[in-house]
Amino acid sequence: MERRCLDAKYKGVSTGTTILAAIFDGGVVIGSDSRASIGGEYVSSKTINKVIQVHDRIFCCMAGSLADAQAVLKAAKFHLSFHSVQMESSPLVIAAATVLKELCYQNKDELQAGFLTAGWDRKKGPQIYVASLGGMLLEQSVTIGGSGSTYIYGYVDAKYRPNMSREECLQFATNALALAMGRDNVSGGVAHLVVITESGAEHVVVPGDKLPKFHDE
């Protein structure tokens, strides 16, 4: 009885998160908040970086169980490193997304994690792929995920435009994260953003006190 009570009380660390990615003219922005929670009940960390580099111009955002996501991304990095050696070139973004999809699908009964993959490659330029919990893979021009995403679907639908400039897309992503972090109790901290183009990747961090405010908080 005591063990059952403990199991019910202590839940795994979740990223309880807001993640997004959006394509602009010549590149893609991928970003997230930095808060992790335990069972969605209290904040266990305010400094988690959920935007993970898996290759030179390929990044992933994770949502769900933090331990599951980290294990999958560690395996994906190994697969992509080996793949790039075999091919003697950088992997395509679809290759990275497919590796994540296969890992999610093969372990769908044990995993509780989903991923956004964004990047730039020589074949198709900027791309975004979503690998869901069950291993489904979708390509999209803009996407959001995590617990905070439910608060910003309207904003994203109204404000996203194809062929935005780099600055416009970066502001769009910052505003979307700020809106979600202001409403979702398990999203917060700072905004981690990565801008990926042909020339490389640039990491942008917006501190919590520098995020735009849209209502009294």
Image (cartoon, grey):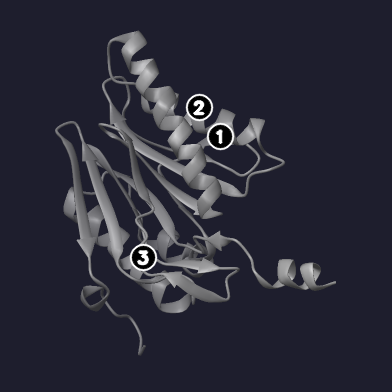
Image position of 175 (left or right of 102): left
**Viewer-proximal residue among 163 and 57:** 57
Q: Is residue 74 above or below residue 38?
A: above
Q: Is residue 64 above or below residue 187?
A: above
| Residue pointed to by mark 3 | 177
* Quarter occupied by residue 84: top left
Q: What's under tag 2, amino acid-wise?
A: Thr
Q: Is residue 24 above or below residue 7?
A: above
| Residue pointed to by mark 1 | 137
**Viewer-proximal residue among 68 and 100:** 68
Q: What's under tag 3, amino acid-wise?
A: Leu
What percent of the width, then of the height, locates residue 59? 34, 40
* Quarter occupied by residue 9: bottom right
- Tell me, for residue 98, which label it has, or none: 2
**Viewer-proximal residue among 67 and 106:** 67
Q: In the image as oriented, which residue stretches furthest toward the left?
A: 199
Report crowding for label 1: few under 14, some 14 to 19, many 20 or more residues within 10 A (C-alpha).
some
Q: Earlier in the sequence, mark 3 or mark 1?
A: 1
**Tag 2 and tag 1, C-beta contact below 8 Å:** yes
Q: In the image as oriented, which residue stretches furthest toward the front?
A: 2
Q: Residue at x 60, y 68 (%)?
A: 39
Q: Secondary structure at mark 2?
A: helix
Measure the alpha-carbon separation of dots 2 and 1. Answer: 8 Å
Q: Residue at x 39, y 16 (%)?
A: 83
* Quarter occupied by residue 178: bottom left
Q: Secondary structure at mark 1?
A: strand
What percent of the width, then of the height, locates residue 64? 55, 55
Q: In the image as oriented, which residue stretches furthest toward the bottom?
A: 216
Measure the alpha-carbon separation of dots 3 and 1. Answer: 23 Å
Report how many numbered discs are placed on residues in the image.
3
Front disc: 2 or 1: 2
Measure the alpha-carbon separation of dots 3 and 2. Answer: 27 Å
